[in-house]
């Protein structure tokens, strides 16, 4: 947003208010994109992380860690006191700070590791028996032979 020397203060204030309203609307639209549902959805692909904006990723991680009412808890863990900063992020009035997003990722990784230690990671389950390739080939050849005999 640029201003010129000929701009009246009322015009400048109106443009600033309009820009603020656009940022807030954009932030609300991102937040309403159901980031948790997007993050948990099976999109196929190669198993990489979903494509989320920083606000969507932050919201999804926070909701997974703290539940539906996560604002104050995540603000406290990030050292932001009463949650005003996080509410500003959610409303679109400010951008999620990259350092705070990185810190929340670290918290999530630590909790995931703790949960994995507690419930296991399936590495201790017995392996499935290997399939016998000779048996599979014999069944296949028997099926082919039966098919040829039926065609006769």
Image: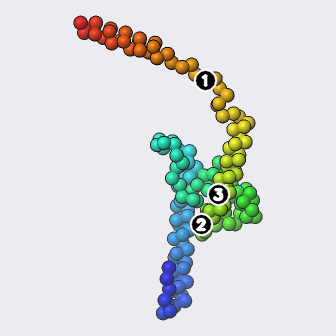
Asked whether residue 32 appears in the rendered view, the answer is: no
Q: Which residue is mark 1?
A: 127
Residue at horizontal 60 percent and vertical 52 percent from the top? 60
Q: Nearer the viewer, residue 6 or 13?
A: 6
Q: Which residue is mark 2?
A: 95
Vertical arrangement, residue 74 with respect to residue 22, above or below:
above
Residue at horizontal 30 percent and vertical 11 percent from the top? 147
Mark 1 and mark 3: span between their CA atoms? 36 Å
User: What is the x, y in percent for residue 107?
Assistant: 70, 51
The quadrant where residue 146 appears? top left
Q: Nearer the viewer, residue 86 or 121?
A: 121
User: What is the x, y in percent for residue 51?
Assistant: 51, 53
Asked whether residue 7 appears in the rendered view, the answer is: yes
Element on which disc 2 rests: loop
Assign the C terminus to one quadrant of the image.
Answer: top left
The residue lying furthest to the front in this view is: 134
> What is the crowding at mark 3: few (fewer than 14 residues within 10 Å), some, or many (at least 20)?
few
Left or right for 144, reference 21: left
Q: Nearer the viewer, residue 152 or 61?
A: 152
Q: How many marks?
A: 3
Q: Are marks 2 and 1 in contact (CB under 8 Å)?
A: no
Element on which disc 3 rests: helix
Q: Nearer the viewer, residue 132 or 147?
A: 132
Q: Which residue is mark 3?
A: 102
Residue at horizontal 67 percent and vertical 48 percent from the top? 109
Element on which disc 1 rests: loop
Q: Are marks 3 and 2 in contact (CB under 8 Å)?
A: no
In terms of sequence position, does the residue under pointer 2 or pointer 1 come before the other?
2
Left or right for 142, reference 67: left
Vertical arrangement, residue 14 with respect to residue 51, above or below:
below
Left or right for 102, reference 10: right
């Amino acid at each position: 947003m640029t201003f010129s020397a000929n701009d009246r203060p009322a015009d400048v204030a109106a443009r600033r208010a309009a820009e603020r309203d656009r940022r807030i609307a954009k932030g609300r639209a991102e937040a309403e994109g159901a980031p948790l549902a997007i993050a948990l959805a099976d999109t196929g692909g190669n198993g990489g992380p979903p494509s989320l904006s920083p606000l969507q990723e932050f919201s999804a991680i926070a909701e997974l860690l703290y539940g539906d009412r996560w604002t104050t808890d995540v603000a406290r863990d990030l050292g932001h006191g009463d949650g005003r900063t996080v509410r500003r992020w959610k409303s679109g009035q400010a951008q999620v700070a990259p350092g705070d997003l990185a810190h929340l990722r670290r918290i999530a990784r630590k909790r995931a590791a703790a949960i994995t230690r507690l419930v296991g990671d399936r590495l201790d389950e017995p392996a499935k028996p290997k399939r016998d390739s000779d048996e599979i080939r014999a069944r296949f050849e028997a099926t082919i032979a039966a098919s040829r005999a039926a065609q006769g």
